[in-house]
Amino acid sequence: MYISISPQKLGGSFSQSVGDFVIYLEKENQEKNLQENEYFFNQYDDKIRPYEVIKEIDGNTAKLKQTEPKYYSITVNPSQYELKHIHNNPEKLKTYVRDLMKEYASAFNREINGRPIHINDIKYYAKIEHQRTYKSYDTAIKENAPYSNKIAHLQNKLRKVARGEVSGNMNSIQNEIKKLSRDAPYKIQGQPIEEGMKKEGLQTHIHIVVSRKDASNSYSLSPGSKYKASEVMMHGKNVKRGFERDRFFKSAEKSFDRLFSYNRNYVESYMARKTFTQNPQNYFSILMNLAMNEKKIAFKMLRETGLQLPILHLPQNKVGFAYKQLKKIIETGLKSSSIGY
């Protein structure tokens, strides 16, 4: 499970309204019949239409400055293992989102009228999407780039030869294009992956638009607060402040596991990703000391990225090389343990 929280983009050509983002989230509906459309939903209602989302979010911005985000975007990316476990069931995903947003409310170290933040204080709208396309920052696009650029150059040359603008052997150019296509490291059904192509496998994910202001349009609730859970003296009173991101991310996983009896492997966990970022050596140590069954599953998940694990029982002079290879495998495994974003 990979979850990200991003503030509204502001400045330049970006709109103060949520409208552009809501329209963007309607992109999959453009390819469907009206009966097949995915609607927005919130804690209590389904089939919420885009104009309602825009009206409610844009109308809930009292006293916010133009330089302040009016809403936040939460993207929930279940792994393919998690999606398979729940059979990619959209109703189960809705149930999960509704439980997740209770955890979101609980992660605020804030009070409203002397009580903790409750889910009814959160104004949000969620939308399930089923497709993802390759973006310029994806590993497959970056590593295919040298091949794609050469293929594009040769295809342009081929067209010029066909028009008689330049001399050349068309068969030779076509054979060179075929060879480059075969040699490209990332392919779908034999075709090199290019930007804009749809990703294979289960790609279901959820976008959640959350108002910066509470449901009463009176209190600012920012998950991007620079303050961790703490208290500060204001006007002679202790005031709670902050948002506990670690708590939210951990609770998000526990919620999924509890709801659907999911047995999470170490390499899928938020704490594993955090440990790897902060202390890779400790991550490797934990990985190697997992119980045998869990270790086998962990390595299976990592191997499915397309890389092979190095032989771990190596002479001492080869350990450094194996360590680097294992690090590369784990980095790729961490990226693929959730769907790209």
Image (cartoon, rainbow, N blue to C red):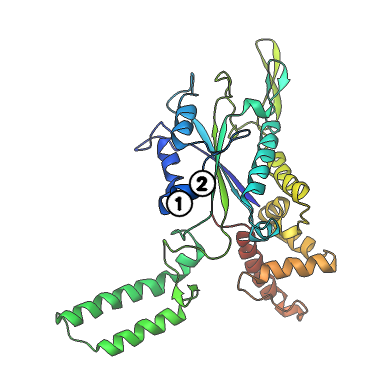
Q: Residue placed farthest to the right in the image?
A: 291
The correct choice, above or below, for 312 with respect to 38 in the image is below
Q: On the image, numbered disc 1 is attached to which residue?
A: 28
Disc 2 marks a residue whose amino acid type is Glu
* Quarter location, residue 169: bottom left
Numbered mark located on residue 130 in the image: none
Answer few, some or many: residues within 10 Å of disc 2's Cα (few below 14, many 20 plus, some between 14 and 19): many
Residue 325 at least partly seen: yes
Query: Residue 221 sits in which quadrant?
Result: top right
Q: Report the mark closest to the observer, 1 or 2.
A: 2
Q: Residue furthest left?
A: 165
Up/down of 285 relative to 54, above or below: below
Q: Position of residue 302 (x, y in %)?
A: 67, 68
Residue 68 visible in this rendered orientation of the protein: no
Query: Are the residues at dot 1 and dot 2 in contact (C-beta closer than 8 Å)?
Result: yes
Q: Give whichever of 267, 30 is nearer the camera.
A: 30
Q: Secondary structure at mark 2?
A: loop
- Taking 276 as reference, is 3 above or below it? above
Q: Residue furthest top?
A: 236
Crowding near pointer 1: few (<14 within 10 Å), some, many (20+)?
some
Percent of width and height locating residue 331? 63, 63
Q: Earlier in the sequence, mark 1 or mark 2?
A: 1
Mark 1 and mark 2: span between their CA atoms? 8 Å
Q: Nearer the viewer, residue 37 or 253?
A: 37
The residue shown at (78%, 57%) is 263
* Position of residue 67 in the picture relative to residue 160 (left or right): right
Q: Which residue is mark 2?
A: 38
Residue at point 30% right, 85% down? 173
Toward which corner of the image does residue 144 lie, by quadrant? bottom left
- Is 178 situated above or below 242? below
Give the image location of residue 37, x and y in percent: 48, 47
Residue type, numbered disc 1: Glu
